C-alpha cells in the first residue's frame, strides 16, 4: 500500500513513540475502546461484530455444515452408499459404538480422519479502504485468511476439532467463518481475531446422533437441540506490536502503522500460552527485541482476553434473557 505519510509527520510520530507519547494521547501499550455484540446475523450459526473506537469495524459470521473429513477420497466410499461407512468393507477389525474411534486404516487419511475443520475467509468492503490498491487489499485478505486457518486448525487453536467428527473416517462438521472488514482504522488483524473468537463463542452446533445398523453408520441431525463449540473459551486473540523507531506500540492507528518498520502479531489464549506468531513489515527484529515483544504481547493479550470475556459473558446473559441485539448506535 502507498505510504501516504510525509517525512515531517513520520518524524513527529516516530520521535513521539520513542518518548512514550502518541498523537491521540495514549501510552505505547494502551488500546482504544472496543465495542462488541454477538448474534447480529440471525441466519448464521453464530456471529459477532467488533468495532474499535474511531477505528476498524469487523463483522464475522459462522455457518456449520456437514462434510467429508479432510483427505477422504472416493475410493474410501462404499459403492452405492453415499454418506455411509461400511466398517467391514473398509477392512476395519471391529465396529465402533459410543464415542470410540475407528481404526486409522478405515479412512486412510491419518490423524485428520477423525477431526473436523475450520475454514476461514476474509473479505474487505470496497468502501473500507478506498485509498488502497485493490490488489493490495486482496493480498491482505488472503494473508489474513491463511493466518486464521493455520491458527484455528493448529494444535493450539482452542477448538476441540475431535468433537467436530460425526463418523470417524467419513463425516465431520465443517465450521465456515466468513469475515467482512466494514471500516479501516488500523489494527485490523487483532480486530478480526476478536470478531472470530466472539462469533465462535456465539455459535450453536446442532446435535448429531450416530447409529450403527448392520455395520453401517448413519447419523441424524436434531436442529432443535444445539450445543456450544467445545474449547471455545481457549480460542486465542491476537496482539500486534509495531516497532516504530526504537519504540513499540499496540493498537496502532493507520498513520502509526505506516510509520512502523516491523510488526509482530502474538496469538495468546486464556492460559497465557503463545499459540502462534506472525511477523510482517520490511524491517528486522533483533533476538532480544523479539523476546521482549513476545512477552509484552502475552501481557497485553491477557488484558484483552479478560476484557473480551466480560463482554461475552454479558452477551450470553442477554441471550438467556431473550434480549435481541440492537446493533451499534
Image (spheres, helix red, strand yellow):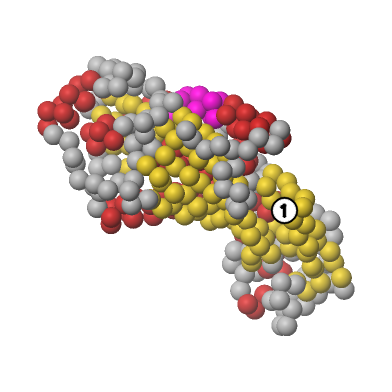
Magenta residues span: 297-308
In the displayed image of the protein, which residue is found farthest to the bottom?
80
Nearer to me, 176 or 185: 185
Nearer to me, 14 or 124: 124
Instruction: Check disc 1: other Cα within 10 Å, few if <14, some if 14-19, many if 20+.
Output: some
Q: Quadrant of residue 16?
A: top left
What's the residue at 24%, 46% (across, down)?
A: 131
Position in image of residue 30 (x %, y %)? 39, 22
Position in image of residue 280 (x %, y %)? 32, 42
Q: Is residue 25 above or below residue 78?
A: above
What's the residue at 27%, 31% (across, down)?
A: 256
Position in image of residue 96 (x %, y %)? 82, 62
- Give SS at disc 1: strand
- Residue highlighted by disc 1: 206
Q: Is residue 313 above or below residue 157?
A: above
Nearer to me, 246 or 105: 246
| Secondary structure character of the magenta stretch overall | helix
What's the residue at 12%, 28% (across, down)?
A: 8
Amino acid at each position: 500500500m502507498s505510504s501516504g505519510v510525509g517525512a515531517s509527520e513520520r518524524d513527529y510520530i516516530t520521535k513521539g513513540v520513542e518518548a512514550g507519547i502518541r498523537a491521540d494521547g495514549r501510552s505505547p501499550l494502551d488500546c482504544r475502546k472496543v465495542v462488541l455484540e454477538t448474534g447480529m446475523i440471525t441466519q448464521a450459526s453464530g456471529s459477532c461484530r467488533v468495532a474499535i473506537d474511531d477505528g476498524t469495524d469487523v463483522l464475522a459470521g459462522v455457518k456449520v455444515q456437514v462434510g467429508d473429513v479432510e483427505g477422504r477420497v472416493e475410493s474410501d466410499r462404499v459403492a452405492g452408499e453415499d454418506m455411509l461407512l461400511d466398517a467391514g468393507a473398509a477392512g476395519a477389525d471391529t465396529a465402533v459404538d459410543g464415542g470410540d474411534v475407528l481404526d486409522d486404516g478405515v479412512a486412510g487419511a491419518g490423524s485428520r480422519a477423525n477431526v473436523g475443520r475450520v475454514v476461514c475467509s476474509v473479505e474487505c468492503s470496497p468502501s473500507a479502504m478506498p485509498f488502497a490498491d485493490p490488489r493490495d487489499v486482496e493480498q491482505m485478505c488472503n494473508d489474513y485468511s491463511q493466518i486464521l486457518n493455520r491458527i484455528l486448525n493448529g494444535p493450539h487453536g482452542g477448538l476441540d476439532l475431535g468433537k467436530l467428527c460425526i463418523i470417524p473416517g467419513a463425516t465431520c462438521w465443517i465450521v465456515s467463518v466468513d469475515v467482512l472488514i466494514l471500516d479501516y482504522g488500523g489494527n485490523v488483524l487483532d480486530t478480526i481475531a476478536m470478531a472470530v473468537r466472539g462469533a465462535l463463542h456465539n455459535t450453536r452446533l446442532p446435535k448429531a446422533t450416530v447409529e450403527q445398523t448392520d455395520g453401517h453408520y448413519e447419523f441424524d441431525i436434531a436442529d432443535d437441540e444445539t450445543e456450544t463449540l467445545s474449547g471455545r473459551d481457549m480460542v486465542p486473540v491476537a496482539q500486534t506490536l509495531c516497532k516504530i523507531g526504537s519504540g513499540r506500540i499496540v493498537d496502532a492507528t493507520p498513520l502509526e502503522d505506516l510509520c512502523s518498520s516491523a510488526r509482530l502479531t502474538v496469538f495468546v489464549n486464556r492460559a497465557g500460552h503463545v499459540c502462534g506468531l506472525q511477523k510482517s513489515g520490511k524491517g528486522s527484529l533483533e533476538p532480544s527485541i523479539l523476546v521482549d515483544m513476545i512477552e509484552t504481547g502475552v501481557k497485553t493479550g491477557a488484558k484483552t482476553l479478560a476484557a473480551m470475556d466480560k463482554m461475552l459473558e454479558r452477551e450470553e446473559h442477554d441471550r438467556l434473557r431473550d434480549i435481541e441485539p440492537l446493533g451499534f448506535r
